[in-house]
């Protein structure tokens, strides 16, 4: 028969070992398949965003929107595939020569995302990758003339952000990204649409 004091010692050591194992176990929060949506502001550097009353110029810019799908590689790295939408329009109201020009860009981005603190519910990260960019333009130089042309080019992007885990399956994130995007020829306003993006994301983690 085992003495009672030895049984007490054994029980205490066992409970201590179980508690130590529980606290030593590391939880990784963002190494999961994720789908999400983004909204924000994309400002290509070469576009003029000012409205000039003297020339009756009107400019319209859409909110940048995107959806993305993220697949983990390991506990710190993940691939992210993003499809975005951007629209910009410039209309000059003149009786002699009315001009309306607009562009639409659909960027598809593939990023490698690195979580700096994946074992915490608030994790900063960095990302970098490439993009395929589809551009569509419209130009109306008079009431009877219009034209449509399609453009395509590859680009690159890199950025940094932070993800916040709200619940087990829901997170939000803020990101600052620079998107390098230059077409081979002039695309209505310019050939270079490189610029910064600031976005807010809402994500579902499976």
Image (cartoon, helix red, strand yellow):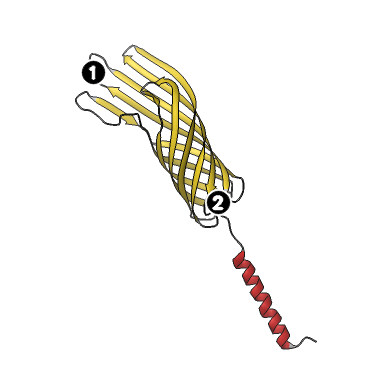
Q: 115 left or right of 7? A: left
Task: Decide: is 143 above or below 198.
Answer: above
Q: Residue at x 30, y 31 (%)?
A: 49
Q: Which mark is residue 65?
A: none
Residue 35 or residue 49, whichever sits in front:
49
Pointer 1 or 2: first along the chain: 2
Q: What residue did someone put label 2 on? A: 30
Q: Position of residue 138 (x, y in %)?
A: 39, 20
Task: Decide: is 137 above or below 200.
Answer: above
Q: 46 left or right of 123? A: left
**Number of other residues with Cα within 10 Å of mark 1, as a class: few under 14, some 14 to 19, many 20 or more:** few
The image quarter containing residue 92 is top left
Q: Position of residue 162 (x, y in %)?
A: 46, 50
Q: Residue at x 54, y 47 (%)?
A: 114
Q: 174 left or right of 22? A: left
Q: Residue at x 56, y 54 (%)?
A: 29
Mark toward the viewer: 1 or 2: 2
Q: Secondary structure at mark 2?
A: loop
Q: CA distance from mark 1 to mark 2?
A: 54 Å
Q: Position of residue 45 (x, y in %)?
A: 36, 32
Q: Secondary structure at mark 1?
A: loop
Q: What residue did someone put label 1 on? A: 94
Q: Position of residue 112 (x, y in %)?
A: 55, 41
The image quarter containing residue 16 is bottom right
Residue 98 or residue 118, whichever sits in front:
118
């Amino acid at each position: 028969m085992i003495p009672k004091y030895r049984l007490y010692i054994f029980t205490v050591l066992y409970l201590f070992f179980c508690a130590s194992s529980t606290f030593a176990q590391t939880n990784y929060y963002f190494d999961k398949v994720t789908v999400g949506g983004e909204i924000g502001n994309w400002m290509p550097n070469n576009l003029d965003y000012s409205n000039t009353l003297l020339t009756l110029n009107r400019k319209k810019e859409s909110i940048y929107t995107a959806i993305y799908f993220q697949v983990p590689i390991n506990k710190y790295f993940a691939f992210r595939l993003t499809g975005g939408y951007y629209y910009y329009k410039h209309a000059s109201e003149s009786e002699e020569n009315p001009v309306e020009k607009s562009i639409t860009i659909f960027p598809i981005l593939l990023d490698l995302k690195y979580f700096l603190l994946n074992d915490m519910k608030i994790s900063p990260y960095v990302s970098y990758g490439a993009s395929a960019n589809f551009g569509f333009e419209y130009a109306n130089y008079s009431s009877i003339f219009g034209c449509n042309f399609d453009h395509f080019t590859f680009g690159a992007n890199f950025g940094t952000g932070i993800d916040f885990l709200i619940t087990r399956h829901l997170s939000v994130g803020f990101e600052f990204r620079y998107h390098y995007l230059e077409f081979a020829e002039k695309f209505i306003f310019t050939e270079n649409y490189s610029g910064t993006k600031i976005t807010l994301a809402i994500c579902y983690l499976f």
